[in-house]
Image (tube, helix red, strand yellow):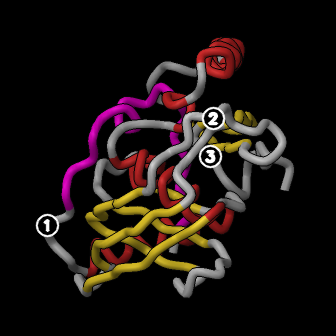
Amino acid sequence: MTVLPITIWGEPVLHRRASEVEVFDDELRTLIADMFETNDAANGVGLAAPQIGVGKRIFVYKYANDDGAPPTGVVVNPVLTLSKVSGAAPDPDEEEEGCLSFPGEQYPLKRAEWARVEGFDGDGNPVKFEATGWFARVIQHEYDHLDGKLYVNRLMDRYSRKAMKQAKKNGWGVPGLTWMPGVDPDPFGH
């Protein structure tokens, strides 16, 4: 297993829809193992393939939950069903979100409280589970990456302006920027 560099906001693969996985083989299983290794090295709760520069519809997660889902898992070609997202403003103390591809920054975002995900594991076997609360947030966040969206694309105007100002200050928004988990300082201070 290999720890891979994580792409930063502005890398084209992060901003376009990922393609469906069509072949379940050893190459896919190696990619998934590398994604788990990278996510662990980055102290992440989830990682989508576009975040390591691969435009495929795959994400891994590592999140202890009370929903009966395995605490670690992979979903290939996921389909997501969500409850309605409240129109209320996000609570800045309880609903702050971060992203390994927008490293070190966190902003409040309202998400659906419930999600059902269906897809496949790395061997092509069906996977289906429900997620609530923060686990649902993790699943939605990773799924968004597969559609070319980062959580900062969903922020309310005032937080969006702050995020874009910070991206500009950090020199993000251009191709070729990455950070290396386990080598570079942890952007979230874990």
- Asked whether residue 4 is drawn in magenta, I would say yes
Dominant secondary structure of the residues highlighted in magenta in the image: loop
How far apart, in angstroms, are the residues tagged by discs 3 and 2? 26 Å
Residue type marked 3:
Leu
Please report whichever mark, 1 or 2, sits nearer to the chain's N-terminal start: 1
The residue beneath circle 2 is 88
Disc 2 residue type? Ala
Residue found at x 48% / y 54% = 140
- Labelled pair 1, 3 in contact (Cβ < 8 Å): no
Q: Secondary structure at mark 1?
A: loop
Question: Going 43% across and 30% down the picture, which residue do you hit?
Answer: 11
> Is residue 118 placed above or below 94 in the rendered structure?
below
Image location (x, y in percent) of residue 186: 78, 49
Position of residue 139 measured from the top left corner of the image (x, y, whole percent): 50, 60
Question: Is residue 33 positioned above or below 148 on the image?
Answer: below
Q: Is residue 57 magenta?
A: no
Quick one: SS at disc 2?
Answer: loop
Q: Earlier in the sequence, mark 1 or mark 3?
A: 1
Q: Is residue 101 visible?
A: yes
Residue under numbered circle 1: 22
- Quadrant of residue 48 in the image? bottom left
Residue 152, disc? none
Residue 105 place in picture, x, y as percent = 73, 34
Pick the residue in front: 123 or 27.
Answer: 123
| Cα distance between the residues tagged 1 and 3 | 27 Å
Q: Nearer the viewer, mark 3 or mark 2?
A: 2
Residue 32 horizontal side relative to residue 45, left or right: left
For the point 33% across and 81% down, which residue is it?
127
What residue does disc 3 label? Answer: 100
Q: Which residues are magenta?
A: 2-20
Looking at the rendered image, the disc whose residue lies closer to the viewer, 1 or 2, is 2
> Is 115 placed left or right of 132 in the picture?
left
